[in-house]
Amino acid sequence: MYRHELKYMVNPGNAHIIKSRLKTICEPDQNADENGQYKVSSLYFDDFCNSAINDNLSGSLKRKKFRIRIYNGKDSIIRLERKVKNDNGGRKDSAILTKEQYLRILQGNYVFFKNSDDEVLFDFYNYLSTRLLQPKVIVEYDREAFICANGDVRITFDSNIRSSVGSMDILNSKALSAQVLRPQDTIMEVKYTGFLPSHIKNIIQTGNSNQQAFSKYVACRTFIN
C-alpha cells in the first residue's frame, strides 16, 4: 500500500513544541531508548548510472532505491529495504538479512539471492546483476518517532545527520563520520495512509515549519562527493 509523506525543516524550538504535544496523543517508537531516541544507520546503493540520486535530483515521480538498515549499531536485525515512489505516494518493502548475507553483499557476492523466493531479495539481485548496484554512502542520524494508530500516522524527527567517511560498513563502529547538517537542524517527516487526521495536521503546523523536499541520502552523497 502506498503512503503519503510530508517533510519539514524545523528549528529546535518548534521541534520541542511539536514533540511535547505529540507525546500526549501518540505512542513512542519501540526502538527508542530511555531518552526517546535511537540511532539509524543506512547503507544506500546506486547503479552505474547513479539513477537513484539523479532521479531524486530531477524530481522524477517514479523511482526506486535500495538500502540496508540497522538500529543502534546492532546486527540483531539487518533489514534490506526497497523504497518505491510512484507519483505522490510511496511504499517500503523489506526483507531480513543475516549478518553473513550482509557481509557477503559487501564483498560483492550475491549469487545466493538468485533463486530466492522473497520478492524483495530477488529484485535486489536483479538490480545488482543487471544494473551493477554498488554501495555508495552511509547515512546516519538520531531519530525520535511517534505513532498514531488513527490514520496510520508515523511522525519522525531526525537530527545530527551525518555520513560515514572512508567506510561502507554500517557495522563498523570505528568508522569516522562527518556532520552533513548542523546538529540542531531537524527534519520532521509525517507518513500516513489514506488521510491525515485534522488534530495531527494542526499540531505539525505549529510555528514556522517549512514543508520542503529533502533527501538525507542526496544530502550525504553530495556532501562527500
Image (cartoon, rainbow, N blue to C red):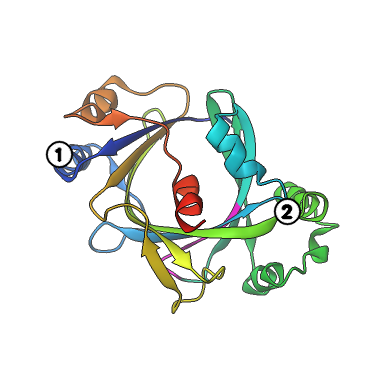
Q: CA distance from mark 2 to mark 1?
A: 41 Å
What residue lies at 50% left-to-right and 76% top-to-bottom?
172
Which image quarter: residue 173? bottom left
Q: Amino acid at mark 2?
A: Leu
Q: Is residue 83 visible?
A: no
Where residue 207 appears, as percent x and y from the top left, is 16, 29
Q: Main secondary structure of the magenta part?
A: strand
Q: Secondary structure at mark 2?
A: helix
What residue lies at 33% left-to-right and 23% top-to-bottom?
197
User: What span is colored magenta in the figure?
Assistant: 67-73
Where residue 58 appears, as percent x and y from the top left, is 57, 31
Where residue 167 appears, as percent x and y from the top left, is 53, 71
Tell whether 170 sits left or right of 95. left
Vertical comparison of 17 with 77: above or below: above
Instruction: Give whichever of 93, 164 is nearer the camera.
Output: 164
Residue farthest bottom in this picture: 174
Residue 71 counted in the magenta span? yes
Vertical comparison of 188 with 195: above or below: below
Can you say which quadrant of the picture contains the N terminus? Answer: top right
What residue lies at 45% left-to-right and 54% top-to-bottom?
223
Q: Amino acid at mark 1?
A: Ile
Q: Which mark is residue 121?
A: 2
Q: Which mark is residue 49?
A: none
Q: Which mark is residue 17?
A: 1
Q: Is residue 111 visible?
A: yes
Residue 68 counted in the magenta span? yes
What residue lies at 76% left-to-right and 49% top-to-bottom?
127
Tell whether 46 sits left or right of 221. right
Where residue 44 appears, as percent x and y from the top left, is 57, 55
Label 2 crowd bin: few (<14), some (14–19), many (20+), radius 10 Å? many
Of labels 2 and 1, earlier in sequence is: 1
Q: Secondary structure at mark 1?
A: helix
